[in-house]
Image: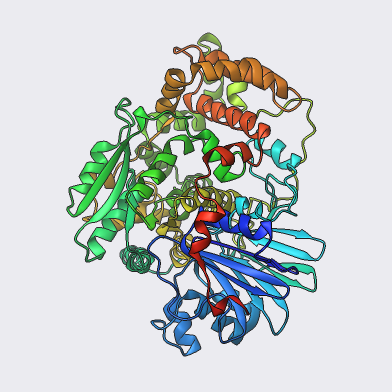
Amino acid sequence: MTCVAGVFGAPLLPETDDYHDLLAAAATRASSPISVVHWDSGALLQGRRRHQMAPKAGTPGRDTLGLALVCTGRLTNSAELAHELGISAYSCGDTTLIAHAYRAWGTDAICRLEGRFALILWDQQAQLGLCARDPFGQSPLYYSLLADRLFLASDIQMMFGFSDVSREVNQMSLTRYLKGMPPADAETYFSAIKRLPAGNFMIWQQGRIQLQTYWKQPLDIAYSSLSFAQQVETFKALLDKSIEPSFDASSAPIFFLSGGLDSSSITAAARRLLNAPKLQAISMILSEDPRMNEQKDQQAVAAIGGIEVTEIDGSKIDYLASLDQILFEQAGPTLGAGMGLSFHTYLTAERLGADVVFDGHGGDETISYGGGRLHELRRDGRWLALFYELLRVDPKTGAASILKLISKAPPLSYVRNGFKRVFPGTEVSTADQAGTSFLAPNEAFDLGVSPPHHVDTLYPERIEQTNHLTIVSDPLQAYAFETLDNLAGRRKIQMQYPLWDHELVAFCLSLPPDSKLRHGYDRYILREAMRGVLPESVRTKKAKCDFSGTALKSVRRDRRAEMDQLFKDRLPQLSDLVDLEKATYVYDNLCHDDTKANTGFLVQSIWKLSSISKWIEDPTGRTFNRSNRATGYETISSTLKQDGSNDL
């Protein structure tokens, strides 16, 4: 399913505006049929993605177990669950499996689910509502508790379908955004709307909610006892397992092929694994930025055979042209400065009729750069191994790191300090150093309640493993998934992130440091697993694509008048929130092509300042919605599933 919604504690009557508005909002994320089930004190709604067939058994509210259940995403352990429950996995869909699991194990069933999912369940017998979100937060779920009523939806714009849900802006989230941080913990950009944290479930009963964490990253992870060759084979098997079920369930799968290691590995592994005439891929090239254009790498992967690539030239795209639409679909400003370009890959996937898109997002985090190994080598005094790795990672920065390391203590420190005085380096701007924080200096800042990013393991001497756990557990990961889901959901596309498969992540966390960083190569085990599968030029590449040069060129070419208005007229009106001195620094550098300011810093700053100024003017996107809404209730009423199953 691509979207779900529900209400506990109040009926959702067909003759109300809420009913019509909710259906219209669902129609922007789902193809027909849209199914609704009612009972005397609530309702659930679900919409399916393009080409997706109705569940093999059961509809929302017509389950023989006395449950109403809707769910987005897809379980990856359906076969294992069905075996435990003693039912056939081929005769039922995920919702029926979850219903049987709930009847068998109660809320403990949530702990047994693996994959990407957000579910809402109503137990008529117990008069209990249950909702849950997968461990990594790949599928979003939002809620609003008003008096003794609970409103739920997988999209904030769908939450606005409930007229009683307030649109008041969350000021704390706004200030966090200006500081370069996502909303805290369960917060969103609207005070009345909360998000269910990843790895949590919530129970609603008699007008009260109880939130409970059912999954956390395991801290006591033993290192794998397998040989490295066995580790590589295990990694291959887990990667294959994470790709095949979702591909088989798709009618029109598409792969995002950037030319980088992660997306190339997924595409090449799928080509090797799957018996399909051809794979369809989408690639973005940067024709006017030869240094960052990965077209040759994309073509090298396509040359494996059976991969048809649709190219998008990012150099020709107006970087800020879709900002209004993005702000509306995200229901708030986002930290993803690359969205101005990547938005077009989702539009292309929609145009090509994709129902599922495979994305390499997160490989850096789940497989790990392995940088913690360098700290371990230094701690253990293994200097030759440390210098070797530093120089192999990058000879220039490695040599600089070695010099910095050995010149911290006398007598070399005296030579280093004297050299700096005689030959002072170029001074880095204070604004540039501070990053993209634009909160006004006089604005009081409250961090709010947020889970700690740092993870204390039972083995603190394992620096790399601690670093890896910290990155995977960072709330920013779930926030990124929400952002991507909003992009894909509006295109009626379901995203798949094979490198965030539960078993694969757990295995990578168990790997010793030298399986992640070796011979100067990060994500070393992935590179070895792709030996003979990927072209060597791609398998061994170290450089990462940086879109900022292309984006900055687009802003100067296509949006100069708009930037003048932004910095001269609109931002001064937000002086109580925005640091105007720093904004002026950005504008001055934007106006000069020969600027020495960091390109990435400028692009992120322009994205943030443009986003916040537009969003504050129209937080709920009503203006955009009125002028661009192509589907109203009148045109989608025929897609409503009208049969006897609509009453529980």
Considering only vertical position in the picture, is 479 above or below 324? below
Q: Position of residue 59 (x, y in %)?
A: 52, 76
428, above or below 525, in the image: above
Tell me if residue 453 can be seen.
yes
Q: What is the residue that sits farthest to the top in this orientation?
A: 422
Against 134, residue 90 (above or below) is below
Q: Nearer the viewer, residue 110 or 614?
A: 614
* Res. 527 visible in picture: no
Residue occupying the point 68% across, 81% down: 124
Residue 560 in picture, x, y percent from top left: 49, 17
Q: Residue 219's image quarter?
A: bottom right
Residue at 58% across / 48% down in the picture?
476
Q: Does residue 177 lie above or below 101 as drawn?
A: above
Residue 498 in the image, given as x and y percentages of width and height: 40, 59
How is the structure coloured here? rainbow
Left or right of 257, for residue 406 = right
- Judged left or right of residue 427, residue 241 is left
Q: Residue furthest bottom?
A: 86
Query: Which quadrant is home to the C terminus?
Result: bottom right
Q: Which is nearer the eye, 565 or 380? A: 565
Number of marks in picture: 0
Residue 387 placement (x, y as % from top left)? 41, 39
User: Residue drawn at (62%, 78%), measured in percent from left and top?
Assistant: 647
